[in-house]
Image: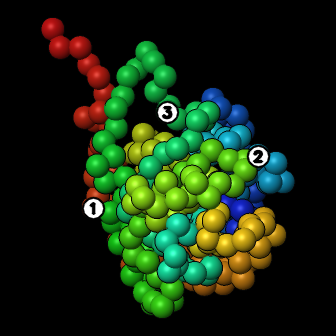
C-alpha cells in the first residue's frame, strides 16, 4: 500500500472510497483509502480533516504511525513551499534531495528511550521513490521541474523574515516550508520510504512585497491536476512494485546496543 500526505491546498486530492480511523500511541488518525490505477492508496490530510493542526502542532508521529499500522511501505509527502532562489517561479515543482531542520518544538522521534536508535539519513529521501517522482514529473511538466533542491523547514506559524530568508540563501538552501520535518525522518525510523513533491506557491519573504496564505492556497489549488498526475505516474508507471532501496533495512543497524 502507498501513502500520500497532503498539505495545505491538497486536502481533497484524489477521489477516495472509504474512511479509516487508526489508533496509535500518539492519537487517532483518519485517512482515506482508495485505488489509484491498479494500486491501493491511503491518503492523509497532514493538518487534520478540518485543517485544525497548524504546522507546529501537526501530529507528525501519529500520522506516520497510522500509515505504518495500515501497512504502508512508501509515502509521498506533498508540500507547499516558498522559493529562496530568485529564478524559481510559483507553480514550479521541486523534488528535494536533502533537508535542513530549523523547527523547534515537535515530536522528532519514535525512540524516546529506553530503546535508543540513530537512523542514517545520509540519503534523507528514498532514492528510488525520488527517482520515480522525477521521471513522472519529466513526463508531466518538464518546464516546471527542479529535480533536486535543499528544503529548509521552519517552525511557523508565521512566515519567515527577509533576514531569515537571506541567511538561508547564503547557507545554500533552495526552498522553505513548515512541514517537511520531522516527517521524512519519522518515516525512516519506521522503515518506510519517503520522498516529497514540493510545489512552489510563492517567492520567499523579501523576494516579493508581501506574502499571503490566500495566495499560497490559490497556487496549490491550481496545481492539483498536474501534481495528481505526477503522483499517479510515479506509482503506476515508474515505481517498481518491489522495493530495491535500503529504507526498510536501515533500522537493523541503527539501534544502540551496549557492547560488553
Ligand atoms: N515559507 C514557509 N512555508 C511556506 C511558504 C513560505 O514562504 N510558502 C508556502 N509554505
- Looking at the image, do the residues carrying marks 3 and 2 touch, with CB atoms under 8 Å apart? no
Please tell me which of labels 3 and 1 falls first in the chain: 3
Residue 234: % across, % down: 46, 76
Q: Are marks 3 and 1 in contact (CB under 8 Å)?
A: no
Q: Residue at x 17, y 14 (%)?
A: 259
Give x and y (percent) for residue 226: 60, 84
Q: Which residue is mark 3?
A: 109
Crowding at mark 2 (Cα within 10 Å: few <14, some 14-19, many 20+): few
Residue ID at (30%, 42%) = 120
Whichever of labels 3 and 2 marks the residue nearer the N terminus, that label is 2
92 left or right of 26 in image: left
Circle 1: element type: loop
Q: Residues within 10 Å of mark 3 (few under 14, many from 20)?
A: many
Element at badge 2? loop
Q: Nearer the viewer, mark 2 or mark 1?
A: 2
Does the closest atom of ligand 1 sit within 8 Å of the Cβ of label 2? no
Residue 42 is drawn in which quadrant?
bottom right
Label 3, secondary structure: give it: loop
Residue 23's place in the image compared with 174, above or below, is: above
Q: Which residue shows up at 58% across the image and 54% down it?
A: 163
Q: Which residue is mark 1?
A: 244
Amino acid at each position: 500500500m502507498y501513502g500520500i500526505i497532503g498539505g495545505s491546498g491538497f486536502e481533497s486530492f484524489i477521489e477516495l472510497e472509504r474512511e479509516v480511523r487508526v489508533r496509535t500511541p500518539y492519537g487517532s488518525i483518519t485517512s482515506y483509502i482508495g485505488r489509484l490505477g491498479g494500486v491501493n492508496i491511503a491518503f492523509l490530510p497532514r493538518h487534520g480533516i478540518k485543517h485544525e493542526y497548524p504546522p507546529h502542532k501537526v501530529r507528525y508521529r501519529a500520522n506516520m504511525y497510522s500509515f505504518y499500522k495500515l501497512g504502508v511501505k512508501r509515502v509521498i509527502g506533498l508540500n507547499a513551499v516558498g522559493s529562496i532562489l530568485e529564478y524559481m517561479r510559483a507553480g514550479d515543482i521541486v523534488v528535494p534531495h536533502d533537508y535542513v531542520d530549523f523547527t523547534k518544538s515537535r515530536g522528532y522521534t519514535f525512540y524516546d528511550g529506553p530503546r535508543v536508535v540513530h537512523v542514517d539519513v545520509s540519503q534523507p529521501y528514498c532514492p528510488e521513490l525520488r527517482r520515480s517522482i522525477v521521471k513522472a514529473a519529466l513526463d508531466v511538466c518538464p518546464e516546471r521541474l527542479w529535480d533536486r533542491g535543499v528544503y529548509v523547514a521552519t517552525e511557523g506559524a508565521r512566515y519567515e523574515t527577509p533576514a531569515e530568508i537571506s541567511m538561508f540563501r547564503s547557507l545554500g538552501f533552495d526552498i522553505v516550508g513548515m512541514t517537511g520535518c520531522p516527517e521524512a525522518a519519522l518515516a525512516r525510523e519506521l522503515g518506510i520510504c519517503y520522498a516529497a513533491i514540493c510545489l512552489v506557491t510563492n517567492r520567499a519573504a523579501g523576494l516579493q512585497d508581501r506574502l499571503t496564505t490566500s495566495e499560497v492556497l490559490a497556487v496549490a489549488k491550481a496545481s492539483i491536476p498536474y501534481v495528481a498526475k505526477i503522483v499517479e505516474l510515479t506509482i503506476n508507471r515508474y515505481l517498481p512494485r518491489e522495493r530495491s532501496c535500503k529504507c526498510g533495512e536501515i533500522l537493523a543497524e541503527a539501534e544502540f546496543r551496549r557492547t560488553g
